[in-house]
Amino acid sequence: MPRPAARNGALSGLLWQALNRSAVPLKLFDSSTGFRLADGSVLSPDAALVARERWQALTAEQRRGFAPHCPDLVVELASASDEGPRGLTALRQKMAAYQGNGARLGWLWIPEQRAVEIWEDQGQAPRRIEAASRLDGAPLFPALVIDLEDIWGGLRGSTKASP
């Protein structure tokens, strides 16, 4: 399994490509960005997308620190080899915190299982997609489409043969 920085780099690259193809008006943030949530906690997802209009509405000072709002879409990336804060139980608690603080959509990617948990409705259990090969942000961000096949292999450390 690649080191966390490599996984997060691949995740950010994949989301950046999807945003450029879709022209969805969202701003991408990586795992070094913290958000101050309504409950007072500060969390840093592996990747976050915030509506550009919400980001632009912040003052320059608010943008320099922990943004005082919850991202619109959060992505967390599970690692089978990690315990504690990177384990599935901890990540599910983190996803529930995002959901409870206003995230409109959350994706928990589980590469070892080729599965994605989709956190959409507050108070509802996440919807799980097994053998996920493609993911879209519908109904909130329908133009945001991600092909997971390349990233699953890359996150597990395998390489894809060139034609």
Image (spheres, rainbow, N blue to C red):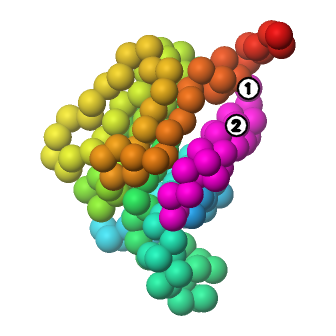
Q: Is residue 12 left or right of residue 128?
A: right
Q: Is residue 162 left or right of residue 88?
A: right
Q: For the residue labelled by badge 1, is the local secondary structure a helix, a strand or a loop?
A: loop
**From where the camera sits, is residue 87 visible?**
no
Q: Is residue 158 left or right of residue 92?
A: right
Q: Amino acid at mark 2?
A: Ala
Residue 58 falls inside the magenta stretch: no
Q: Do callouts 1 and 2 mark residues in contact (Cβ within 8 Å)?
A: yes
Is residue 61 positioned above or below 87 on the image? below
Magenta segment, principal secondary structure? helix
Is residue 49 positioned above or below 61 on the image? above
How many residues crowd mark 1 within 10 Å: few (<14), some (14–19), many (20+)? few
- Which one is in front, 19 or 9? 19
Residue 25 falls inside the magenta stretch: yes
How many residues crowd mark 2 within 10 Å: few (<14), some (14–19), many (20+)? some
Position of the C terminus, as image quadrant, is top right
Q: Position of residue 136 (x, y in %)?
A: 43, 38
Q: For the residue labelled by badge 2, is the local secondary structure a helix, a strand or a loop?
A: helix
Residue displayed at 51% across by 75% down = 55
Q: Residue 10, which numbered label?
A: 2
Tell me where the magenta segment starts and ends, as one range.
1-26
Q: Position of residue 1 (x, y in %)?
A: 70, 20
Residue at image mark 1:
2
Residue displayed at 40% across by 51% down = 141
Q: Residue 30, which numbered label?
A: none
Chain-order first, disc 1 or disc 2? 1
Q: Position of residue 104 (x, y in %)?
A: 32, 55
In the picture, residue 129 is in which quadrant? Answer: top left
Residue displayed at 21% across by 47% down = 121
